[in-house]
Image (spheres, rainbow, N blue to C red):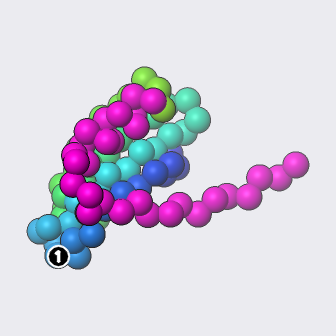
Amino acid sequence: MRVECHWWNGNRTPKGRRDVFIRTDGARWEVEAQIGGASGKSKVQECPSQASAVILANAWRGSNPSWLEVPQPRVPTHS
C-alpha cells in the first residue's frame, strides 16, 4: 500500500500528535487515524473507493483548521 495523502495536526508532542493517512494499492483503499505518532495507537478502516476514503479522512480530521497536508514523494513512472 502506498500513501496517497497524509495530514497531521501540527502538534509535536507524543500525546497530542494526530495523523490521518489515505493509502491504496491501486485496487483497495484504506484510511488510518493515528494518535501519538508512529509508536502510538491507530485505527484502520477499509473503504470501497477513493471518494469514500476522502470522505472518511475529512470526517476523522474534523473541522479544526490546524491540520496540515504532508507532501508525498512521487515515484517516477517509466515509459
Amino acid type assigned to the residue bearing label 1 in the image: Thr
Task: Please state if 68 lies on the left or on the right of 37 as rendered.
Answer: right
Of all residues, the one furthest to the bottom in this rendering is 12
Q: Position of residue 79 (x, y in %)?
A: 88, 49
In the image, what residue occupies the spot 33% across and 42% down?
A: 57
Residue beneath disc 1: 13
Task: Please state if 14 lies on the left or on the right of 28 as rendered.
Answer: left
Position of residue 3 relative to residue 50, above or below, is below
Whether the magenta-drawn stretch holds residue 9 is answered as: no
Q: Name the image quarter holding residue 17.
A: bottom left
Position of residue 73 relative to residue 54, above or below, is below
Of all residues, the one furthest to the top in this rendering is 48
In the image, what residue occupies the spot 45% across and 44% down?
A: 23
Q: Residues within 10 Å of mark 1 (few under 14, many from 20)?
A: few
In the image, what residue occupies the spot 48% across and 32% down?
A: 50
Task: Please state if 15 lies on the left or on the right of 63 as rendered.
Answer: left
Whether the magenta-drawn stretch holds residue 74 is answered as: yes
**Secondary structure of residue under mark 1:** loop
Q: Position of residue 11 (x, y in %)?
A: 21, 71
The residue range painted magenta reads 51-79
* Marker count (numbered): 1
Of all residues, the one furthest to the left in this rendering is 15
